[in-house]
Amino acid sequence: MLYGYGGTILYVDLTSGNIRKEPLTKEMAEKYIGGEGFALRLAIDNIPVNVDPLSPDAPIIIGGPALGGTFAPPSGKVSWVMKFTLPADETGKCLIGSAKAGSANFPVAMKQAGYDAIVVKGKADKLSYLKISDDEVEICDAGEYRGRSPGEVTTALRRKHGMGVGVAAIGISGERGVRWSLAFQDSQGSIGRHGTGAIFGSKNLKAICISGTKGIKVAEPDKFMQKATEMYNGLRNHPATPLMQQAGYTAFMSVFENTLSQGNWPVHKLGFLHDAPGADTYIHRITADACCPMGCKCCLVVPRGPNKGRRTHIHALQVAVLSDRLEIDDPSQAVDLLTEYNEAGLCGTTFMGMADWLSRLYAEGKVSKETIGFEMKRDVESYWKLLDLIIRREGIGDILAEGHMAISEHLGVDVREDTVGIGIAKGCHPNYDGRFTTLDPLRFIYFVCPRPNHAGYHDITTVPSDVPHWPMPLQSIRDNYSKGAVLADELESAFEPVPYYGPGFNLGLATIINERNGTLYNAWGTCSIFPTISASFVGDMNELWRYASGIDKDMGDLVECADRIYNIYRYLNAREGFGRKYDWVEAWFTPRMTPTGPVPLMDYYRTRVLSKDDVNRLLDDYYQARGWDIKTGNPTKEKLREYGVSV
Ligand code: SF4
């Protein structure tokens, strides 16, 4: 038997109803660990090259956390790998991405039902939900949930099948195929920003509902419990924990303020969240992923107006970002608007980016009232009208639903050339603007990661501005990085500064360490927040995994595992036609204008303005250190063979 694992990979074909189960092999566990590692490995054989992401042949692949279902703190991240639906450019090319979602029930239920990975393909003949309960797998009628929000479906399925079930569900925008719709895991964690909802919808799949009673046997129970308890107590007693439990990330708004700024100057409202009396009126409660004693997520409630009392789960930071970006003075109105798009299952970052861009184009006379369908002011009423059109897929809303490239073509204005917005990376908005944050390793990941995202890749340099210890002293960064997945000689090279970046470190090489850490956390299903606050590191998680699985890996083995998984991630996208020319955020090379002057793209210590040539040289370093082809930015055949991938 395999300790620490469910032991089975489940395949479901929604078209034929065929269910197949395969045992998880020890080799798979040793080479790919779990979570993202399993899901990406399975993608090689299960995602057909150039498949239409909305076709029945395009699967949803779910990687269960290696430490899920145990008492490992935390262990609530599930990896969802699929070919996403938001085109990266005008050719319509779509990327294969790995989206990480954290929540309380789903990761535990999946593992305790006995599944380490699930592959769902096909298309049900009517709106359905997939019910998995230990060994029983059933495709059930979901007609009664048509049009209902992820939160409503989650509650309804829990009432029907038990409060402990894990649920992944979509809203109406997923049913209607909006290419930037989301699915939600336990209505707590959003899955992806590139159309997970539309992919579920294309399969007539409203939800996946899972429960398990089998438990997980660990290899060395006493050592496991001792280490897990020690880590749990360490997290519970961390100085940040009481603040997080009170207000989630909102507690650190003053820390995040500058880096989250969206820059609709001179309006700048981020500060209101922690200053304004009344924030507690819309933060209903804080929630956490499985076995996390800290918690950083919020259940928000609309405090006033006709929708008073309506609730949704989202990071409260989004209230601040939305208010800042779309100039909404009243946080209550911001909560109301975000509740609407969240419960429709839409990506908030994409919605606010589109509304921001369109309203600026309208103000500049570049788009007309006839084109938009109404007078597009920068006010809440206009945003509601736009949102309504997108959800109903009517008029301009139908084109916006197809993504940035479709609306750019329709308007004859390329969104990638908008330098006042946050920028576009591979067809979507990155979460942060690198001009405000500096080009640190996380922001460089927006260039090079197949799916530009931050999940799993936070590091000590992302603990941002306005605090006395920022930017972090170099020694603190080095100490922190030395506890990641890195070999001694690599650490030396990563901290050798290069003239085309700035003092301290070589960004390209440091980024690889960050990516490796993130890949391991995503495989174990743990959280990258904790290393940023020096609460736990790769070594802690590896020790816990060793006691759980009995698999003993040293740092060299871990580095190899992480690189194997990441090379496969890049390879999957290379065979779809992605490569170096997509590793770019053009807008960031034009300084953002603020009331205090222009803000250009700079190195972490803000000593140099970075040119395109500088960033190209950093990309060269990155590809070279990865052992990839510098011209294409992709793994070579030899590199892939090293990891046992035959091409
Ligand atoms: S701190 Fe990490 S594990 Fe805890 S709730 Fe937040 S994202 Fe999840």
Image (cartoon, grey):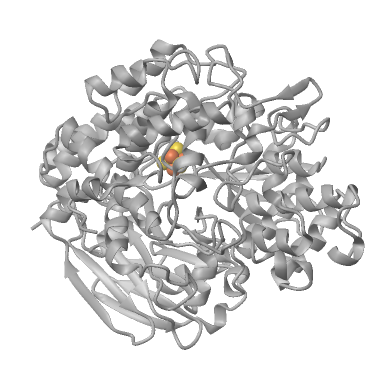
In the displayed image of the protein, which residue is found farthest to the left?
1
Residue at screen point 36% across, 47% down? 634
Foreground of the two, 115 or 398 = 398
**Quadrant of the image containing the C terminus:** bottom left
Position in image of residue 272 (x %, y %): 74, 31
Nearer to us in this view, 140 or 375:
375
The answer to whether 434 is drawn above or below residue 415 in the figure is above
Report x, y in % for residue 328: 81, 43
Q: Quadrant of residue 12?
A: bottom left
Residue 253 visible in the displayed image? no
Q: Residue placed at 55% from the left, 56% from the top?
A: 88
Relative placement, left or right, of 129 versus 326 is left
Task: Specify whether 485 is left or right of 462.
Answer: left
Rendered location of residue 333, percent (x, y): 79, 49
Report the front residue among 27 and 168. Answer: 27
Percent across and percent down for residue 322 are: 71, 44
Q: Which residue does the image show at 36% across and 39% down from the upper left?
A: 518
Q: Nearer the viewer, residue 214 or 78?
A: 78
* Residue that lies at the very extreme toward the front in this rendered image: 631
Q: Total of numbered circles in the picture?
A: 0
What's the residue at 55%, 61% (across, down)? 182
Q: Quadrant of the N terminus?
A: bottom left
Q: Is residue 316 left or right of residue 571?
A: right
Examine the rendering and report whether any part of residue 233 can be seen.
yes
**Ligand 1 visible in quadrant:** top left
- Residue 61 falls in which quadrant of the image? bottom left
